[in-house]
Amino acid sequence: MTNKQINFIALFFLILGIFVRFYHLDFQSVWFDELFYILAASKSSLKELLDIHFVDTNPPLLTIIYFYWIKIFGDSVYSLRFTSAMVGSINLILIYYYVLRPKFFRKEVYFYILIIFSTCLGGVYFSQELRSYALMMLLSFIYLHTFSGIILNILEHKEGSKNDFIILAITSIFISYLHYFGFIYAGLGLFIIFVFAITQKNTRIVLMSILSGVLFLLFFSFEIFKLLSLKGGSINWIPQPNLLIYLEFLNFIFYFLKGKYFIYFIILFLVLYTYSFLSKKILKTTRTERTLILFYLLFSLVVLSFTFFVSLYKPIVTARNLLVLIFPILFIFSYLINRIVLPNKYLMNFIIILFSLYMFYQYYSDYSKPHKTDFKSLAIVSAEKEYSDFILYSFDKVDFYNFYGQKYNKEKKVIMLPEISKQNLTLLPNKFILLEAGLLGKLADDQIHILKDQYKMKNISFYGSEMKIFTRE
């Protein structure tokens, strides 16, 4: 393809990627983790917000951003999720810029990354969630490019730019205050630079990496002490590392666990590369590209190995936490695919375009289905006219239910269900609704049995949540 053709197709996928990130932003219900950020950011003061984070594993940067965002733009779901969609779109625009003006790799590598990232599950889904992952991916991309420039300076025995280390230090601090995996990613990247600079006897970069590391640790020291004091108590739900976690992470990029044809695309890529390699029809690449791909591979393996061994002691690895590695993996994949030489030079571009469009189709084929705990449906149904005289209870986290409840029925608030016993049943109203979300704990079976003695119970289930409707004659 000519440069103009590549640029035109890249522009199409840029527009498509931005569109799908903003499409129906408030369609899916906000769920447990999103509500945590919303309610924390809705506190009346910054001190109250920080008090919440003093006892939580999440760093406070995203909540602080939402705190000021809510003051200006309000707390509607669309407004809050707009921030993630905007960040995801900026990420696409940045990749598109490198398609137009490639820096370390040839144009086609950035072209493939843009096409895949525009429609991949991780890129789209987490740009429509009110959490840290969209911004974490953007900062990881910026960090990776700065990391690449420093690695090349070491390789070429150059002194290195102060600006690169300033950008690296600032990006490291921000990505760390978004998520503790950001801290691991940034810290291990800086460690790789330090070790490589020592092996190449580049004293200036050794000193600059030490200075950047000291500043980085100083700025993040409070969060380190906080995590150590919490002993990871609030992330006990994370399982021991297993193959499914890593497959799910790859699914965020290549979506091969969804749709019967995805695996055929992956097999096709492997067959084509093997064929090109064995027939010695492999595109020659520059020393710069080969070096960076080796370092991206090393970087990814170091992060994966470190987090795996930590997780053997205290599980921390989830598929979405590994999204910090999405761009090293995409660069490696796109570089390898670009090396394949086919009889028709346009064929690989066509396959990648088809692959991306197929991901787009599969994602939106079941977009109307709830993806997480459905607080929104609970609020809508419980606000219907037939339940106007029912008291609304929940077993836990009443503020989570009231976020949507107050939007659909301002006259009624969800209140905490008192502890149930045979002696206090007479204190309960004749009609009430118990709202339950799967992540927030179920009402004990023995208490349900107590209620059934005097009440008729009707159950309405949603995705990850349910309404128990109790009536007593």
Image: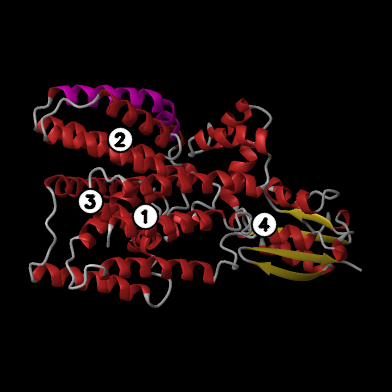
- Percent of width and height locating residue 208: 23, 23
Q: Secondary structure at mark 1?
A: helix
The amino acid type of the residue labelled 4 equals Phe
Q: Earlier in the sequence, mark 3 or mark 1?
A: 3
Residue at mark 3: 106
Q: Residues within 10 Å of mark 3 (few under 14, many from 20)?
A: some
* Front label number (1 vs 2): 1
Segment colored magenta: 204-227
Q: Secondary structure at mark 2?
A: helix
Q: Earlier in the sequence, mark 4 or mark 3?
A: 3
Would residue 297 be seen by someone viewing this image from the given angle? yes
Spatial separation of the CA atoms under disc 4 and disc 3: 47 Å
Q: Nearer the viewer, residue 257 or 150?
A: 150
- Percent of width and height locating residue 126: 49, 53
Q: Earlier in the sequence, mark 1 or mark 4?
A: 1
The amino acid type of the residue labelled 2 equals Gly
Q: Residue 464: which disc?
A: none
Spatial separation of the CA atoms under disc 1 and disc 2: 27 Å
Spatial separation of the CA atoms under disc 3 and disc 1: 13 Å
Residue at mark 1: 114
Residue at mark 2: 187
463 left or right of 419? left
- Residue at the image point whose x is 44% and y is 41% from the top: 232
Spatial separation of the CA atoms under disc 1 and disc 4: 34 Å
Spatial separation of the CA atoms under disc 4 and disc 2: 37 Å
Quadrant position of residue 432? bottom right
The amino acid type of the residue labelled 3 equals Arg
Q: Nearer the viewer, residue 93 or 175?
A: 93
